[in-house]
Structures are given as structure tokens and as C-alpha cells.
């Protein structure tokens, strides 16, 4: 089953994001087989990062929650909020 993990950064957290980016990317790499799509959300001018969106495959919500909690960004306290929502791919098939 697929899940959308949508994370919103705390205000003024760019330095915290930068400090934990390498660990975050290594964490994603260690789960690469589960990733459908992943990347940061951006400011309206496309220059700054405001959060993260990941679409990933897990056997259930508990696995998705454990993954999200283990993300170095989450452990560092970067996120103001995290939502995890089941998702179904329809197009393209």
C-alpha cells in the first residue's frame, strides 16, 4: 500500500534542515526500494524549502509511521507537522 507523508517545516528552520540534510538523504537511500517519489516543498518563488513530501510503499500505516519517526529531520525537530495518508496511484497506470 502507498502512503503520502507530508511534512511542514517549523518557521525559520533552514539551518536545521541544512544541518541534517546528509543524514536525511542517507536515510532515504537506505529505504530507496520503498520510495515512489520524494522531495521538498518550496516557497512560492521556488527558492526556499518549506517541508517534504514522500510517497512510499509500506505494508501498513504502522510501518509508515515508524519510517516517518525515524527520519533524521523528524528526530532533529525540523517538522511543525507530519501527516500520513493512504494513497492509491491511478494515473499513469
Image (cartoon, helix red, strand yellow):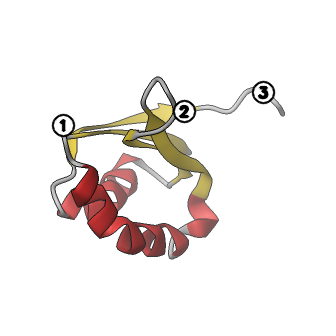
Q: Residue at x 46, y 37 (%)?
A: 41
Nearer mark to the viewer, of 3 and 1: 1
| 10 lies above or below 66 | above
Q: Nearer the viewer, residue 38 or 44?
A: 44
Marks 3 and 2 in Cβ contact (< 8 Å): no
Q: Residue at x 68, y 33 (%)?
A: 89
Left or right side of 73 for 42: right
Q: Residue at x 46, y 23 (%)?
A: 44
Q: Position of residue 58 (x, y in %)?
A: 50, 54
Q: Farthest residue toward the top?
A: 44
Sequence order check: which comes first, mark 1 or mark 2?
1
Q: Position of residue 93 (x, y in %)?
A: 84, 33
Q: Secondary structure at mark 1?
A: loop
Asked whether residue 55 is in view, the answer is no
Q: Farthest residue toward the right?
A: 93
Provide the residue designation for mark 2.
87
Sequence order check: which comes first, mark 3 or mark 1?
1
Q: Which mark is residue 91?
A: 3
| 21 lies above or below 74 | below
Q: Which mark is residue 11?
A: 1
Nearer mark to the viewer, of 1 and 2: 1
Task: Work out how far the residue at label 3 is from the one at label 1, CA to CA, in angstroms.
Answer: 34 Å
Left or right side of 4 for 10: left
Amino acid at each position: 500500500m502507498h502512503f503520502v507523508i507530508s511534512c511542514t517545516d517549523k518557521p525559520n528552520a533552514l539551518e536545521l534542515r541544512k544541518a541534517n540534510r546528509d543524514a536525511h538523504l542517507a536515510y532515504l537511500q537506505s529505504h530507496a526500494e520503498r520510495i515512489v517519489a520524494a522531495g521538498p516543498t518550496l516557497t512560492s518563488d521556488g527558492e526556499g524549502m518549506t517541508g517534504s513530501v514522500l510517497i512510499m510503499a509500506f505494508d501498513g500505516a504502522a510501518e509508515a509511521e515508524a519510517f516517518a519517526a525515524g527520519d533524521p529531520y523528524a528526530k532533529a525537530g525540523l517538522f511543525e507537522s507530519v501527516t500520513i495518508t493512504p494513497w492509491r496511484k491511478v494515473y499513469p497506470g
